[in-house]
Image: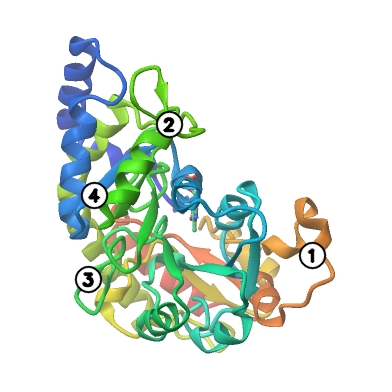
């Protein structure tokens, strides 16, 4: 069986170093917001090219902390792509804000910058861009809109650690960015984890307090905070893995290149990129008219695939109020999309086999 993602194999490569750093934490007897957090926050901020990194519990909370940090709430609108993972939308509704959904560009699967301006109202406070599947959003038009209407740009970088847009990394393309270190992400820990990156000193300080009960000094609560901390073991693991991230992303690019050059089947639409450095291929998503048939065919041939994602947020039961809204491009993507095996530990033989099996597929 060719696995979609072999997490054990991914993490075994760092076993000696992670064992050592985990032992350091256990020996220290200090489990939250300590030395490992400090080290990782510094290293990840440097990696992204930003001034601040604030570790937190997970990617959803990273996005939610940014919204709280800006003080957005009821009556505020945040523009967001309709085809994103549910977490982006939950971060908005959790804080009482209204998400304003915008269709993606069918070529990049990222928010269509040309459809944003018509959705801006007096209530709009921010544009949340999502670097979906690992490809950085093309920011120039969005930067211009944010400037024109005085809006914040919040990045959801949960799928795009290390991707570039015009020489800058994700995490440094807006006012503040949320990352997830869920095990399956390009930079993943061995549990839950996340962080916020920003160049805004005031926001960073506020988020640092909010994630820890709204307190800068123990038992003095200046904000109605939350408990969302990155634990020391996860920070240590991330600090071990971070130096290898660019190399791992390079391997993903090589696999994506091989897939794109060698999969030749009229039934399959391959993903595209506007710039090799913009994409870190968290997901290699193809499209096909009969997705269920192709998925079964691949499974019968011992190739595991996943779907990111089968149902768009506006069709979910939890958002009943939007179930009748129509987002045809989003709905088409969710119906046709299928994610091929993609990870830095896939072997040449495995990648070759995926290509051969796909090239023999007939509808
Ligand atoms: C994974 C993910 C999140 C949420 O991250 P968690 O750590 O699972 O909370 C948010 N947005 C996107 C686009 C994601 O892929």
Task: Give the CA separation, mark 1 to mark 3.
Answer: 36 Å
- Residue at 51% from the left image edge and 64% from the top image edge: 339
Relative horizontal placement of residue 40, taking residue 347 as reference (left or right): left
Residue under label 3, please give it. Answer: 168
Tag nearer the camera, 1 or 4: 4
**Label 4 neighbourhood size at 10 Å, few (<14), some (14-19), many (20+)?**
many
Relative horizontal placement of residue 93, taking residue 108 as reference (left or right): right
Lower sequence index among marks 1 and 2: 2
Q: Is residue 159 above or below residue 208?
A: below
- Residue at 25% from the left image edge and 75% from the top image edge: 277
**Label 2 neighbourhood size at 10 Å, few (<14), some (14-19), many (20+)?**
some
Is the residue under label 2 in contact with that under label 1 (CB below 8 Å)? no
Task: Give the CA separation, mark 4 to mark 2.
Answer: 21 Å
Residue under label 2, please give it. Answer: 222
The C terminus lies in quadrant: bottom right
Lower sequence index among marks 3 and 4: 4
Q: Is residue 348 above or below residue 270?
A: above
Which of the 4 image quadrants contains residue 158?
bottom left
Towards the viewer: 179 or 343: 179
Which secondary structure lies at badge 2?
Answer: loop
Residue under label 1, please give it. Answer: 322
């Amino acid at each position: 069986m060719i696995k979609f993602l072999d997490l054990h194999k991914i993490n075994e490569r760092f076993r000696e170093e992670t064992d050592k750093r985990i032992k350091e934490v256990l020996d220290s007897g200090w489990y939250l917001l300590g030395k490992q957090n400090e080290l990782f926050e510094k290293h990840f901020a440097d990696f992204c090219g930003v001034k601040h990194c604030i570790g937190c519990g997970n990617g959803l909370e990273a996005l939610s902390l940014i919204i709280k940090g800006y003080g957005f709430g009821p009556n505020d609108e945040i523009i967001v792509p309709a085809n994103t993972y549910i977490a982006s939308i939950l971060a908005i509704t959790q804080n009482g804000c209204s998400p304003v959904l915008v269709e993606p560009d069918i070529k990049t699967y990222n928010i269509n910058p040309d459809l944003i301006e018509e959705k801006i109202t007096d209530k709009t406070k921010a544009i949340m861009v999502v670097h979906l599947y690992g490809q950085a959003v093309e920011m120039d038009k969005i930067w211009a809109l944010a400037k024109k209407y005085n809006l914040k740009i919040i990045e959801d970088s949960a799928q795009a650690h290390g991707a570039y847009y015009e020489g800058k990394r994700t995490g440094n393309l807006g006012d503040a960015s949320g990352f997830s270190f869920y095990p399956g992400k390009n930079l993943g820990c061995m549990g839950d984890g996340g962080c916020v990156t920003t160049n805004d000193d005031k926001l960073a300080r506020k988020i640092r307090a909010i994630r820890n009960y709204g307190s800068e000094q123990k038992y003095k609560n200046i904000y109605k905070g939350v408990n969302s901390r990155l634990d020391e073991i996860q920070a240590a693991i991330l600090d071990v893995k971070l130096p290898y991230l660019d190399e791992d992303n390079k391997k993903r690019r090589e696999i994506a290149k091989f897939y794109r050059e060698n999969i030749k089947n009229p039934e399959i639409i391959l993903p595209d990129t506007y710039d090799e450095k913009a994409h870190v291929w968290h997901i290699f998503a193809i499209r096909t008219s009969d997705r269920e048939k192709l998925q079964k065919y691949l499974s019968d041939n011992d190739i595991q695939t996943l779907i990111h994602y089968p149902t768009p947020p506006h069709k979910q039961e939890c958002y009943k109020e939007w179930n009748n809204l129509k987002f045809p491009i989003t709905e088409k993507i969710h119906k046709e999309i299928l994610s091929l095996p993609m990870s830095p530990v896939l072997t040449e033989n495995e990648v070759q086999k995926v290509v051969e099996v796909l090239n023999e597929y007939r509808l």
